[in-house]
Amino acid sequence: MITYIAPSGSTFTFQKTEPYTRRDKSVTSLDTWQAPCAHPGCFDFAVVRVPVGADPASCKAFGKVHCQSHVLTKTQVKERWLAACTEANTKITPEILQQLIAHRRAGVPCSTLALTYDFSESRIRAITSKHVKNRTYTRKV
Ligand SMILES: [Zn+2]
């Protein structure tokens, strides 16, 4: 049994080599590997197909950790990233964070946002500062 442990910790097991017809009708072979789906309680597999003989260590495909039904959408990946950004030091939800960033980018002062949202001015400045460039000039009306 040939196995490969991906950086994610998933253990891929080599399954088989299969012929594969490209869109342009030319024929090649693909190696199929699989690893247990990372979703809790799922017994399906994350299946990866790569060119025959490809070194798993240099294939991005082995970053896959979920089966077909548990693969994350781009939106879910973004949501997880936003959640990770916000959960560390605040109870500010990703939705609120996006709103605050949008208001700050539109030029709304932190002091005004502090009145609208239930967070202090300094906290709003701290969490949005990474996403909003400091404006030193005065906006013309
Ligand atoms: Zn799954």
Image (cartoon, helix red, strand yellow):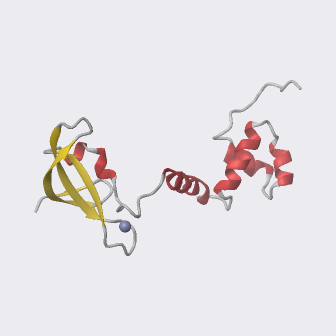
- Figure quadrant, ligand 1: bottom left
Horizontal arrangement in the rendering, residue 6 relative to residue 107 (left or right) = left
Can you give x and y, in whole percent of width and height, for residue 110 in the image? 80, 44
Out of 58 and 43, give the one closest to the viewer.
Answer: 43
Residue, far left = 1
Residue 114 spot, x, y in % from top left: 82, 51
Q: Residue furthest front?
A: 25
Apparent side of residue 77 relative to residue 54 in the rendered image (left or right): right
Q: Quadrant of residue 42?
A: bottom left
Asked whether 139 or 88 is in front, the reply is 139
| Circle count | 0
Identity of the residue drawn at 60% across and 60% down: 87
Residue at image position (41%, 63%) is 70
The quarter in which the N terminus is drawn is bottom left
User: In the rendered image, which quarter is residue 129 located in?
Assistant: top right
Could you say which is closer to the camera, residue 3 or residue 73?
Answer: 73
Q: Position of residue 99 (x, y in %)?
A: 72, 49
